Amino acid sequence: MDSQRYQETVERCSLVKDFELLPYGDLTEIGERGVNLSGGQKQRIQLARALYQNADIYLLDDPFSAVDAHTATSLFNEYVMEALSEKTVLLVTHQVDFLPAFDYVLLISNGEILQSAPYHELLSTRKEFQDLVNSHKETAGSERLKHISPAEKHGTSSKEIKKSYTEKQFQASRGDQLIKQEEREIGMTGLKPYKQYLNQNKGYLYFSLCILCHLMFVIGQILQNTWMAANVDNPHVSTLQLIVVYLLIGTGTLVILLFRSLLLVYMGIESSKSLFSQLLNSLFRSPMSFYDSTPLGRILSRVSSDQSIVDLDVPFSLIIAVGAPFTVFANLGVLAFITWQVLFVSLPIVYVAFRLQGYYFSTAKELTRINGTTKSLVANHLAESVAGSITIRAFEEEERFFEKYLGLIDINASPFFHNFASNEWLIQRLETLSATVLTSAAFGLVLLPPETFSSGINMTMFFVFPNLLSSCNSKDH
């Protein structure tokens, strides 16, 4: 930051009055594609960028087209003739009253340079150029170059500029200017998100059928293990009959599980289609002010990554989170039926598990929300960089934008990493609790007399323990 050059640039580009009108001066936030700037302001800011760069060659393509006559004269006299007096300038313009000030004028017709010469020489030798000049003689302000002196072009001194802008240089703007901060929920939201999801296209019906199928699947597993435990030592049941019935019950539970999965997928598709349709309707019917204050990356994040979570993660996580307690309590019930002494250990552990759940959710929810909001910053910066790649390359700022992009990725990756760490924290403790229940049940079996249970009951315990352990360890439960 060169303060002196900055002040001179603002003055020579006639931006002093514009900065005074902006609510935060030169610290005012500009929306995407400069939505809160006029065409003339955009043009003069582009000229200011070029002048502050202090290059050797300037290619100006009609820089006075979006400004009024007085401002155009001020820009020409102070910007082109003074600030760029020692630079090589190639200026394209349709305002012929500026042409006498140039060293050479190139007369172009049909994409070809007809002649290159000083203004007066070209005026006396080319009929086409004479006709062009004569057609502009009646234009208002054609003699303005002769009457406007450099002292009249601006009324603000450098001292006033310094007072107005250097004070704002280190003054942070309060609150949101144009781009609103991305909103996110805080704390527990209750059942509202689940109700909203299940209200889409008969979601409650499909979800109830999924729960019913899952309950039948759990009952089928218990029946399968019970059949094996009760008849493995029964002399009236042959080995073939024992295996056939066991396989039939297992096949039935698999069919029920397949039907549950199909219902779940259909529920997810219908709910996702409904939510995405509502999202598109909201976007298409939003006022233009919404797009002025909402970055493109935030919208892209909603219709891409957030929608992907609704499509893939929500239905499966929902059925697992609701169905897993059935599996846990069913297996725990079988375990208590065989060795009721395990209840003295399992009930306190269930209480501890609920306390762990509350402690975990209070952190995991916020980390997930932060991860979602910071993801839109990455998408927004990438979209802006792609849209402004020409300007970025012209000013050789690729490295700065790339470093900012990496910084935003780090910001987004941080809550994701901590969320992953919190999941592992929870799983480790759930495994410890599950191992405690498992050890207590096994210890109870060992202490009982050998004739208390048959070999079939022991086999049932062999199937129940792994199911209980796997059901309790998932972070989704």
Image (cartoon, helix red, strand yellow):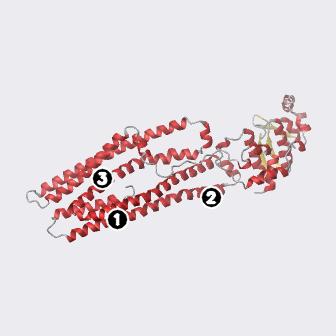
Q: Quadrant of residue 232?
A: bottom left
10 Å neighbourhood of mark 1: few (<14), some, or many (≥20)?
A: many
Q: Residue at x 35, y 60 (%)?
A: 351
Of circles 2 and 3, the one toward us is 3
Q: Residue 305 in the image: x percent, y percent? A: 49, 48
10 Å neighbourhood of mark 3: few (<14), some, or many (≥20)?
A: some
Query: Of the residues under marks 2 and 1, which one precedes in the sequence?
Result: 2
**What whole-number distance in Å separates the C-alpha atoms at marks 2 and 1?**
45 Å
Q: Are marks 1 and 3 in contact (CB under 8 Å)?
A: no
**What whole-number distance in Å separates the C-alpha atoms at marks 2 and 3?**
50 Å
Q: Residue at x 59, y 50 (%)?
A: 382
- Residue under numbered circle 2: 403
In what element is the residue under mark 3? Answer: helix
Q: What kind of residue is marked 1? A: Leu
The outermost residue toward the left is: 236
- Residue under numbered circle 3: 326
Of circles 2 and 1, the one toward us is 1
* Residue 445 in view: yes
In what element is the residue under mark 1? Answer: helix
10 Å neighbourhood of mark 2: few (<14), some, or many (≥20)?
A: few
- Residue under numbered circle 1: 433
Is residue 263 toward the left or the right of residue 177 in the image?
Answer: left
- Tell which of 239 and 137 is nearer to you: 239
Q: What kind of residue is marked 2? A: Glu
Is residue 340 toward the left or the right of residue 306 in the image?
Answer: left
Query: Of the residues under marks 1 and 3, which one precedes in the sequence?
Result: 3
